[in-house]
């Protein structure tokens, strides 16, 4: 049947119109300003993007939801569009998604949402500080250390965002503890206070180290104060037999999504950090009939069969590519928000039934540093030689031992 609106031969959805035409008309109606009877130019971009998306049925499912329609109607009332207007909408996934959609299609300038979220969260967190003097010190730490560090990043990574939140949380708890238990300000801080704080609470208290280093540098406390560092090398490593079982599973099990199989391969075979996996882009991939390669550091790595199958399948699929959310996305691991990749946390959680990413990565590094020269690993995997040497020592296999073995 032909659509009465566009004339295309398509399955009719409503009133003699196809899904695409119904989607476009719905978007046009919801985004029309009731005062002017017109759609503001930035919002017309979204109408056009929804109308031309590859899977209009997905767009219809999304736009028919009451909370989505409420957000779109709110936006329609504005002649201009800014991030501040979006900030005034009820906070939630819908407003976040619409914001990302507007940015992805050029209707709004890009903004680092993690930095904005951190600043809003930090302003509220500071209110938990129980004394004015401590609040002044923590505010300086927040501005000149935590925020300054995040502002230097483009974009702020998920791990940096979480570390900054944890540092501020622990700092507030520490200062409140000093005030409540010892009636102490920063000018009276001693090593005994720090030691007692660390020894009487969870290991997360070691995150006070960042604040202590800043306070020393700012000459607020004596330079000889220190936090006992976490003892490295204590995290569990996946044994080689379990590594082999995981590789066998992700290489051959077709019931797993190619995205999950590829992410697992990058961790269990190439010891990649999930933060680095999440931000991989298609320009680092070359696929021909003969070979599939991916560049993780400086040197392309060829994935032999069957390890190449998930990458080939993902490249050939329309994974997250048929909606208005990702018209020209460079990400291999495309997220559910427009223009965004999946977060490392999401990937870790999704792979949890298959492997624990940290345990798997450390186990793989142990094996690789026993069999491959440090220089080659650094060039292909993106680790610093110092980091790899530390892992080699932890697995009782330094580079010199490797050379000695080769010479025997």
Image (cartoon, rainbow, N blue to C red):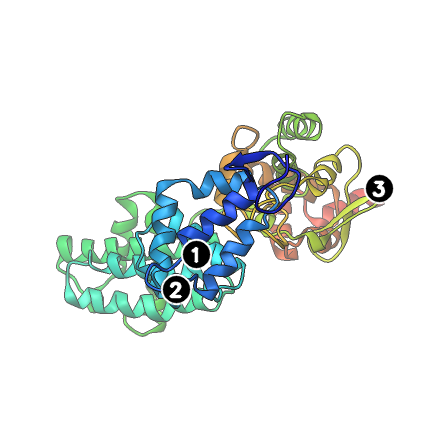
Q: Quadrant of the C terminus?
A: top right
Point out the frontmost of discs 1 and 3.
Answer: 1
In this picture, residue 371 sits left or right of residue 329: right
Picture coordinates of residue 265, whole percent (x, y): 66, 37
Residue drawn at x 49%, y 47% is 232
Which is nearer the eye, 83 or 4? 4
Tell me the number on the disc at residue 99: 1
Which is nearer the eye, 171 or 232? 171
In this picture, residue 364 sits left or right of residue 403: left
Dividing the picture into quadrants, the one containing residue 112 is bottom left
- Whole-number angstrom distance, CA of label 1 to CA of label 3: 62 Å
Tell me the number on the disc at residue 408: 3
- Whole-number angstrom distance, CA of label 3 to CA of label 2: 66 Å
Q: Secondary structure at mark 2?
A: helix
Residue receiving disc 2: 83
How many residues crowd around disc 2 within 10 Å: few (fewer than 14), some, or many (20 or more)?
Answer: some
How many residues crowd around disc 1 within 10 Å: few (fewer than 14), some, or many (20 or more)?
Answer: many
Picture coordinates of residue 255, whole percent (x, y): 63, 25
Q: Quadrant of the N terminus?
A: top right
Residue furthest to the bottom? 219
Residue drawn at x 32%, y 51% is 91
Q: Secondary structure at mark 3?
A: loop
Q: Are marks 2 and 1 in contact (CB under 8 Å)?
A: yes
Picture coordinates of residue 257, whole percent (x, y): 62, 32
Q: Is residue 191 visible?
A: yes
Mark 3 and mark 2 lie on one chain; the one further toward the N terminus is: 2
């Amino acid at each position: 049947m032909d659509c009465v609106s566009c004339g295309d031969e398509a399955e009719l959805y409503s009133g003699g119109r196809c899904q695409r035409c119904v989607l476009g008309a719905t978007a046009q109606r919801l985004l029309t300003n009731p005062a002017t009877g017109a759609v503001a130019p930035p919002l017309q971009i979204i109408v056009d993007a929804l109308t031309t998306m590859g899977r209009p049925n997905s767009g219809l499912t999304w736009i028919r939801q009451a909370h989505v329609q409420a957000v779109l109607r709110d936006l329609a009332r504005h002649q201009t569009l800014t991030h501040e207007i979006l900030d005034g909408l009820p906070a939630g996934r819908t407003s976040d998604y619409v914001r990302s959609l507007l940015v992805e299609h050029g209707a709004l300038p890009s903004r680092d949402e993690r930095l904005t979220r951190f600043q809003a969260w930090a302003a509220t967190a500071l209110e938990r500080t129980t004394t004015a003097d401590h609040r002044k010190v923590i505010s300086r730490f927040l501005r000149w250390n935590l925020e300054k560090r995040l502002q230097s990043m483009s974009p702020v990574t998920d791990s940096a965002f979480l570390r900054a939140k944890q540092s501020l949380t622990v700092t507030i708890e520490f200062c409140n503890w000093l005030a409540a238990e010892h009636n102490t300000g920063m000018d009276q801080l001693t090593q005994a206070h720090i030691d007692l704080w660390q020894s009487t609470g969870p290991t997360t208290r070691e995150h006070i180290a960042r604040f202590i280093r800043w306070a020393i540098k700012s000459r607020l406390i004596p330079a000889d104060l220190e936090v006992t560092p976490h003892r490295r090398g204590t995290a569990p490593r996946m044994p080689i037999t379990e590594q082999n079982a995981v590789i066998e599973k992700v290489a051959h099990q077709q019931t797993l999504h190619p995205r999950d199989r590829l992410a697992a391969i990058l961790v269990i075979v190439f010891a990649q950090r999930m933060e680095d996996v999440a931000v991989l882009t298609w320009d680092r991939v070359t696929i021909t009939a003969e070979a599939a390669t991916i560049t993780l550091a400086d040197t392309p790595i060829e994935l032999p069969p069957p390890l190449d199958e998930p990458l080939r399948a993902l490249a050939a699929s329309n994974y997250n590519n048929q909606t208005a959310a990702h018209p020209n996305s460079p990400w291999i691991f495309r997220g559910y928000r427009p223009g965004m990749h999946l977060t490392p946390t999401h990937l870790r959680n999704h792979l949890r039934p298959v492997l624990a990413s940290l345990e798997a990565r450390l186990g793989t590094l142990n094996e690789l540093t026993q069999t491959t020269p440090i220089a080659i690993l650094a060039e292909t995997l993106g680790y610093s030689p110092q980091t790899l040497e530390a892992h080699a020592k932890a697995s009782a296999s330094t580079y010199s031992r490797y050379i000695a073995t080769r010479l025997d």
